[in-house]
Image (tube, rainbow, N blue to C red):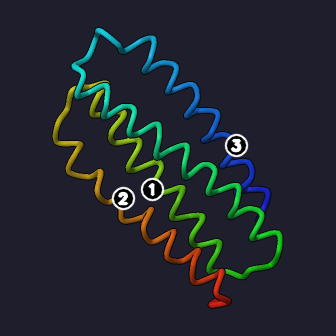
Amino acid sequence: MPRFFFVAGALFAGLAVAAGAFGAHGLEGRVSPDRLQTFRTAVSYQMYHALGLLVIGWATAQGWGPTVHTAGYCFVAGILVFSGSLYLLVLTDTSWLGAITPIGGVAFIAGWLLFAWSALGGG
């Protein structure tokens, strides 16, 4: 199980770097400054949680228990829904996608709360 979180974290981090480069070099001047900031927000949150997945992998390897696994899956879901919806919003100029972004935010928050619970020995 730790391997999944290490691999997912590394892949999401690499993709965040690629997306950041694309945003800086491929989108500047093609989308509004507000949309470019939205794209940067997606990249930032993806990178933060990719690094969080690496920590989750470490905690899993230390035997923290099943709650930490759930936290990791929340991070994965959050990256896909939060960052993914923002990327699509910017690239397709489809504003309604912003309505599902908070679902990813809730997944991130749940992941952090579950991780804290695991750190306290809660499972």
For marks 1 and 2, the one nearer the N-term is 1
Q: Residues within 10 Å of mark 1 (few under 14, many from 20)?
A: many
**Measured along the vertical axis of the image, is residue 14 above or below residue 116?**
above
Q: Position of residue 61 (x, y in %)?
A: 82, 69
Residue in the picture at 46% in, 36% down = 43
The one nearer the camera, 2 or 62, is 62
| C-beta proximity under 8 Å, tags 1 and 2 | yes
Looking at the rendered structure, the kind of residue marked 1 is Gly
26 to the left or right of 58: left
According to the picture, the residue beneath numbered tag 3 turns out to be 10
**Measured along the vertical axis of the image, is residue 109 above or below residue 79?**
below
110 to the left or right of 88: right
According to the picture, the residue beneath numbered tag 2 turns out to be 105
According to the picture, the residue beneath numbered tag 1 turns out to be 78
Q: How many badges with numbers are in the image?
A: 3
Residue reaching furthest to the left: 96
